[in-house]
Image: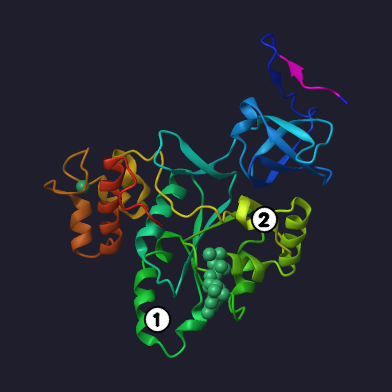
Amino acid sequence: MLRPRRTSAGERRPTPGTAPHGRVILRQGPVLTVLTPSGERVPCLAKGKGKAAVVGDGVYFTPMPPTELAAGIIDAVAPRRNQLARSDGTQRPQIIAANLDRLVVVVAVEPPARGGLIDRLLVAAHAQGIPCCIVLNKIDLLEDDEDTAEDLDEVLEPYPPLGNPVFRVSAATGEGVAELGALLATGTSILVGHSGVGKTSLLNALCPGLGERVKALSDATGRGVHTTTSAALFALPGGGELIDCPGVRMFALWGVEPADLARHFVEFAPFAVQCRFANCRHDLEPGCAVVAAVEDETIHPARYDSYLRLRATVLGGELRGADW
Ligand code: GDP
Ligand code: ZN
């Protein structure tokens, strides 16, 4: 087998096409499982530049004599198409996953969906060029509850016109799950949302038999997968891949400058160019065409409220208001 080249500094550098490589499909503490093109699963540790690896990354690794923990060392990460990053309050972002084709925001009838989280995730996805859809889970709870159904319709109303389709499903009864599976059948999707909205239940509904696989993994490592896993990528039976990140409990924006925020509210764009001031913040400035569009409800007032709240958050540069 060809070995990775060494640079003059002695650092290992991958030789694309020759070094053992694959895709990170699971992270459990320090151990990353790499799926190789031949279908082999290699548990790896990471060093040097390899330490940046997250689920979804293409990586190069060096095989090592298998230990209880690992059989390889990841030394390099292939360039990413995109990444989902959040702030954890430190100077550095936490990268949740990489190379995504779709972000699936999961909300529920209970705990009740609110627009703020959806808008925050839409900004993060737009900043990385990742298409986004919204899943309302637990619609079985809406039977005989028209008031809640109306409230939820109102919360979700702004999104389809923005190009973010809304799917209404029930992981419990299976309603809408096949339609969601069809949407996810291409590319790599990631499920994000508050704890308790039913992400695990949806994953199980989309991937029947997964429960056993999760159990098999826990048996192999002697640890419960969901207690130590920060992210895992699953192949869906109908095609496509789904990343579950059970460890992510909150999502604060990372890397979006206050001056750029309005750009990620896509429906503001046609109005923003008409504001009197080129650097208008769409707040209290005179001649703001965005505010005028909010007043005549061409822009949804709830979206504008989210914009103002998010702006305060990113200006503050901290986690204020950033809980899921
Ligand atoms: P997660 O924290 O997002 O992974 O959520 P879970 O999948 O653990 O679900 C949280 C709770 O909601 C559990 O008690 C599930 O049984 C329940 N749940 C999940 N999906 C549904 C659903 O479609 N309908 C109802 N009624 N309950 C659900
Ligand atoms: Zn303006």
- Identify the secondary structure beneath mark 2: helix
For label 2, the crowd category at 10 Å Cα-Cα, with few meaning under 14, some 14 to 19 and many 20 or more, is many
47 above or below 106?
A: above
Quarter of the picture holding the C terminus:
bottom left
Q: Where does the image place residue 109, in percent across and percent down from the top left?
A: 44, 75
Residue carrying label 2: 225
The residue depicted at 22 percent of the width and 60 percent of the height is 294
Q: Is residue 268 left or right of residue 129?
A: left
Please, which residue is most extreme toward the left here?
286
Residue 300 visible, this angle = no
Q: Is residue 58 visible?
A: yes
**Residue shown at 36% from the left, 70% from the top:** 155
Choose between 229 and 79: the one closer to the eye. Answer: 229
Residue 170: percent from left, percent from top: 56, 77
Which residue is nearer to you in this view: 225 or 123? 225
Farthest bottom residue?
144
Pointer 1 or 2: first along the chain: 1
Q: Is residue 10 left or right of residue 304?
A: right
Question: What are the residue bounds of the magenta stretch?
Answer: 2-6
Tell me the distance, in whole angstroms, between the alpha carbons under discs 1 and 2.
Answer: 35 Å
Q: Which residue is mark 1?
A: 149
Kind of element beneath mark 1: helix
> Residue 1: horizontal and vertical position, in percent?
88, 26
Q: Residues within 10 Å of mark 1 (few under 14, many from 20)?
A: some
Identity of the amino acid at label 2? Answer: Val
From the image, state whether disc 1 or disc 2 is nearer to you. 2
Residue 315 on image: x %, y % = 27, 41
The residue type indicated by label 1 comes to Ala
Residue drawn at (40%, 48%) of the image: 252
Main SS type for the magenta part?
Answer: loop
Direction top: furthest residue: 8
